[in-house]
Amino acid sequence: MSAMVEPVSGGQRINHENYYSELTQGAHAYFDLGAFEFEMGETLPGAKLAYKTYGTLNRARDNAILFPHMYSGTSASMEPFIGVGRPLDPQKYFIVLPGQFGNGFSSSPSNTPAPFDRARFPKVTIGDDVRAQYRLVTEQFKIDKLQLVLGWSMGAEQTYEWAVRYPERVLRAALFGGTAKTTPHNYLSVCLHEEAIRSDPAWNGGDYRDPSAVKAGLTLHAHVFSVLGVCPAFYKKEAWRIFGSTSLEEFIQNFWEAWFLPMDPNNLLCMAWKWRHGDVSRLFGGDLRKTLAQIHAKTYVMPFANDMLFPVEDCAAEQAMIAGSKLRVINSLWAHFAMLCVDPADQQQIDRNLAELLATPV
C-alpha cells in the first residue's frame, strides 16, 4: 500500500506494495546489524534492517525525520506523506523510512535461513525494532537529534518507544491511531487476526512452502480487518464509494483482500505478536504514567474518530500523561484506516497538524 489512492469511478484495486514484486526491484537499502540479540533472549546472526530515505541530510545533520511504518506495511508504505510543499518536504528534511523485523524486507520469517526460518523466527518486540532503528540513525547517518518521529498504529507504538527510550534525541513526536500500551480489547483483536491465519489447514504450523496456499486464512484475516478497521457508519453511509467501488462486495475484494492476500502469513504473525505485546511501560516497571513522563518531545497525539482498534478515549488517556502534549482528533469515517487518506479530507487534516507541529519551537 505504498501509493496514495485517488478517488475514481468504476472500481479499482488498492495499489498495494507487494512484498514479492518489490523484492526483485531492490528498492530498499539495507543496514547490517550483525548478530542481533532480541529482548526475548534469542540472537539472530546476520540480521538486517531495510530502509528508504528521501531528501538530503544537511551538514549539521539536524534536519532528519524518522517515519516507522505500521503492521502489514513496509518502509514504502509511508511514502504518500512525502512531497514538495507538504509538511514532510524532502527539499527541507532528510526523511528516513525505517523497516521493522518481520516486514518481508528487514530480517523476517520469509527471508531468514534455517534454523530461524518461517515460524521459527525469534519473537520480536517493538523495542527490538527501535533499537535497530537507533543504530541505523546513529551509526549509518551519525544523526544526534531527530526533528520529528511519527507513526501510525504500530508506527505509533514505535514512536512512543523512541520518545521514551531516547528522549533527548526526539524533538517532536506525532502519534496517529496508536497507543503506548496495548489495551486488553486491542490485544484480543490482534489475537483474532492471528487465529484467522492459523485456522487455515494450509498454514501447517507455519511450514507452508507457498504463502499463496494459505489463501483461506489470509482472506479471513482480511475480512476481520474489514470489520474492525473502519466503523459501522462507514458501511451504513457507503463511504467506500469514494474508493471507486460500485458494490460492497467489490470493495471487500478490491480493498481488503487485495491488500492482504499477497502477504506472507508468517511475516504477519511476527508483526502481530509484537503489536499485541506492545507496552513501553515495561521500561519503567510497568508504571505507564512514570514512563510517559520521560517524554521531552513536543507531542501531538492524533487518534482517529470512530477507531475501534485504538479508540479516541484510549489515546486521550495516554496523552493526558504527557506534559505539554496536545490531542488532535482526525475526523473520518475511515476510522483506523484514515491514515491511508483515501478521502482527501483526511490528508488535509493530517498535513495541517503535522505542519503546525513542525512549526512549533523546541
Image (cartoon, rainbow, N blue to C red):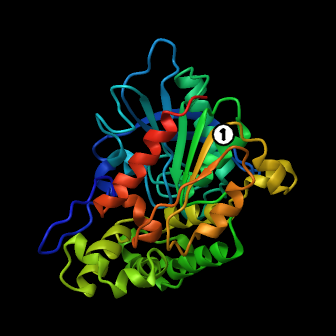
Residue found at x 21% / y 60%:
6
Identify which residue, 61 or 124, lies in the foreground.
61
| Quarter in which the N terminus is drawn | bottom left
Residue found at x 65% / y 52%:
126
Q: Is residue 19 visible?
A: no
The residue carrying mark 1 is 131
Identify which residue, 120 or 92, lies in the foreground.
92
In the drawing, does residue 327 fall left or right of residue 293? left
| Quarter in which the C terminus is drawn | top right
Q: Position of residue 332 (x, y in %)?
A: 41, 68
Q: Amino acid at mark 1?
A: Arg
Q: SS class of the residue under badge 1?
A: helix
Q: Is 340 drawn above or below residue 52 in the view shown? A: below
Residue found at x 72% / y 48%:
322
Q: Position of residue 248 (x, y in %)?
A: 27, 86
In the drawing, does residue 211 fall left or right of residue 288? left
Q: Is residue 119 visible?
A: yes
Q: Position of residue 142 (x, y in %)?
A: 57, 20
Q: Position of residue 79 (x, y in %)?
A: 35, 45
Q: Residues within 10 Å of mark 1 (few under 14, many from 20)?
A: some
